[in-house]
Image (spheres, helix red, strand yellow):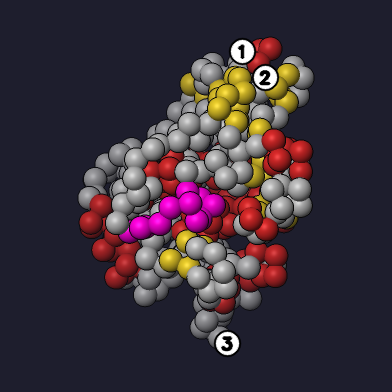
Amino acid sequence: MSLSLLLFFIQFLSPSLQQFPRPCTSPDVLQSKRCCPVWPGDGSVCGSLSGRGFCQDVTVADLPNGPQYPHSGLDNREQWPLVFYNQSCQCAGNYMGFNCGECKFGYFGANCGERRESVRKNIFQLSVSERQRFISYLNLAKTTISPDYMIVTGVYSQMNNGSTPMFANISVYDLFIWMHYYVSRDALLGGPGNVWADIDFAHESAAFLPWHRVYLLFWEHEIRKLTGDFNFTIPYWDWRDAQDCQVCTDELMGARSPLNPNLISPSSVFSSWKVNMKTLEIPFTLMFFAFKIAFQEMLFYNLKSKVQLNTRFVLQTHKTKLKSQYHHIFVVALGQDNSL
């Protein structure tokens, strides 16, 4: 695979965290390729007056693509984000974000100097109030437009060198649906139907575990920002010995509808969720949307007992056991323990 797609979330954490920062979607920014927004805290670009960061040239890996992707210079995601931006905020210390206005994962406080451990719980050990709060946070994220990010609705070649931006608003929750799609979709090689399907940068490569690790941390981070609950953590589900989808109940992720097994139960809050297919243009099945994922992948370590699963086991189990049931319902943290 192209390492730039792995760096999509790891090396490029400080600049933007994907999708597209709202301040960087204007014609002026796209034409200058300079995504260095002002941090409102001190009124300077990248918070430079406060030592938070500086506007610098973006650097990407120059290693060749792997055999899974024998193309170059065709898909906008190659050497990300150079097609759109060649300068961005490079944050210092414990700061991150597209304008260096936020704290790195695990750090809090006005100057991001407070280190705090976050403990994630087994979803079946949540109290009734904790479970209800978790579901309400998901629903709030689904119904709240992201104030910070937009999604791209076309490729750069359609934007007339940035003079006609193609972006759309997106809810906080659907932002993560789109991000997962954007990094996983087929490569667009130009022209109608001209795609390369033999690559999935987030799943079929060495980026599989680290990409999802950072993806989940970012999701958790955005929920905390939205709710003001900085003690919020993503629960996990240990499904290794499960014979069915234990979280697929109306109290959690939603049971199957008794009228149509391809739909979610009308008693679940998720049954009312909608997706603007015309705006998103995501070519996934209707069942995928009916279940309205609460998270993106059912993959994890047994965090409580710290049992490490090798990648082959995770991938094989994922494909054989989970895809046949409820493929995209629940995501939990990947790692060796349940702290950040």
* Cα–Cα gap, marks 1 and 2: 6 Å
- If you read the primary sequence from the N terminus, does the residue marked by circle 2 or circle 3 appear first? 2
Q: Within the image, what quadrant is residue 57 found in?
A: top right
- Mark in the foreground, 2 or 3: 2
What amino acid does circle 2 point to? Gly
* Residue 123: percent from left, percent from top: 45, 52
Residue 24 point in image, percent of width and height: 70, 39
| Pointer 1 residue | 51
Q: Which residue is mark 3?
A: 259
**Separation of disc 1 and disc 3 at Cα?**
59 Å
Spatial separation of the CA atoms under disc 2 and disc 3: 55 Å
Vertical arrangement, residue 36 with respect to residue 289, above or below? above
- Name the element at disc 2: loop
In percent of the image, x 70 and y 29: which residue is there? 37
Looking at the image, is mark 1 or mark 3 earlier in the sequence? Answer: 1
In the rendered image, residue 87, in percent from the top left (x then y), is placed at: 60, 31
Q: Which mark identifies residue 47?
A: 2
SS majority, magenta:
loop
Q: Residues within 10 Å of mark 3 (few under 14, many from 20)?
A: few
